[in-house]
Image (cartoon, rainbow, N blue to C red):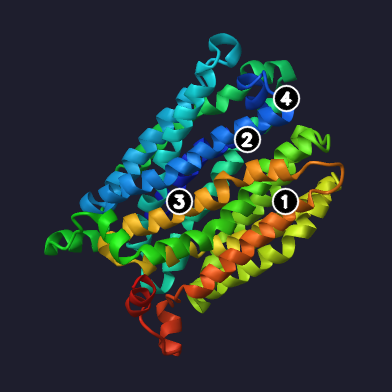
Amino acid sequence: MGRLAVASLVGTAIEFFDFFVYGTAAALVLGPLFFPTFSPVAGTLAAFGTFAVGFVARPLGSVLFGHVGDRYGRRPVMFASLVLTGCATVAVGLVPTYATIGISAPVLLLVLRFLQGLGLGGEWGGAVLLTAEHAPERRRGLWASFPQVGPAVGFLLANGVMLALSAALTDAQFREWGWRVPFWAAGLLAVGGLLLRSSLAETPQFQELSATGRRANAPLAEVARDHWRLVLLTAGALAVGYAVFYTVSTWALAYGTERLGVDRTTMLICIMAAVAVKGATTPLAAMLGDRYGRRPLCLAGCAASAAWMFPMVALLHTGRPVLMFLGFLGALLAFITMFAVVAAYLPELYEPRVRCTGAAVGYNLAGVLGGALTPILATALSGGSGPPWGVAAYLTVVALVSLGCFALLPETLPAAARAKAPSKTSAQATAEVSG
């Protein structure tokens, strides 16, 4: 389990490094380099538009790789998704700017960002299922949480590299070539990830499905027919997590540097410090999920998110590093209270024969609802000289909608909790929700 957990964590860290480094570049430099004829605000919106394309592609990637995972195994998904995302990310670092090739530059960005999202859409399902389906039931939440630490590691790597380059280079050097370096580094990271994953074994549950001939012939059709309501509920439930995280990691970075005049390095340090704490507390929240259940933590995280959005915006608007850090930290702790347990929760909601497709589609559809539009809407809502209360109101509404969706989902109690309190089985509860 230790080797599996490390391989899953490293793989998701690499893939999310690829994904996050684009978001940081979009907030800092892509607007003027690839949309120079736009105003500064419009250029940032356009750059965030290319950022959003990656989220739109993620559900399509989950369909494509989910079919592979349910038909041919979880292991092949982890290799194919890493190769696709890594190659697309390196290519982003090679795209000439608008000044060199004109309109072809942003078009190429869109295509490569789409391919990035396609690969990441498959990564989560493969990495989570490979860990969750190997894990002992009593500690499934803990072991499955390691892939959920990967995004924090990837974010810290991406922004750490950007921070180092920003500090070491002049602004002109950073805009000319420095921003490209993290994209080139993605190639080396992808090779390392492939080597680490080369010795992983297929999961026992998929091997049993293969041996008994019970693999789904058309996983997507089966999910659409029998589990469509469950997919929609999980997508709505997880939307707030994406909205909160990308508000902090992407929109707040642009808002702080462009509107508040905070130094780029200061903003990156505040956000990275909050993300580091979030990553460190992920296994702790997952262990609570193993003890008390997945659903209570998800409900608590949604409620905390709804309560914290206005204080977070107020703290951000001060422009003071310590206060901004506290605002970000409160939001990310509410976020991880939910997302630490979903790596165990979502697979438990779906039967094994369609688990890779169902769990991944629900998870990545939430990214479209909560992650793709949030930086764009937040930028549009943050006009004026006062605190951007419109952003806080939008995030609060998303949190309340997600709270309602979680309230409609069943509990999938871990073994220890199930022994103490009689409850419907996961299969019975899932059948009610999916019906």
Q: Nearer the viewer, mark 3 or mark 1?
A: 1
Q: Earlier in the sequence, mark 2 or mark 3?
A: 2
Q: Nearer the viewer, mark 2 or mark 3?
A: 3
Comparing 198 with 366, the one in front is 366
Residue 41: x percent and y percent? Answer: 72, 31
Q: Which residue is mark 4?
A: 39
Q: Which residue is mark 3?
A: 364
Q: Which SS class for mark 1? A: helix
Q: Which residue is mark 2?
A: 24
Distance, label 4 to label 2, CA atoms, is 19 Å
Q: Earlier in the sequence, mark 1 or mark 2?
A: 2
Q: Which of the 4 image quadrants contains residue 158?
A: top right
Q: Which mark is residue 296?
A: none
Q: Earlier in the sequence, mark 4 or mark 1?
A: 4
Crowding near the residue tagged with mark 3, few <14, some 14–19, many ≥20 C-alpha atoms within 10 Å: many
Quadrant position of the C terminus in the picture: bottom left
Q: Which of the 4 image quadrants contains residue 4?
A: bottom left
Q: Which SS class for mark 2? A: helix
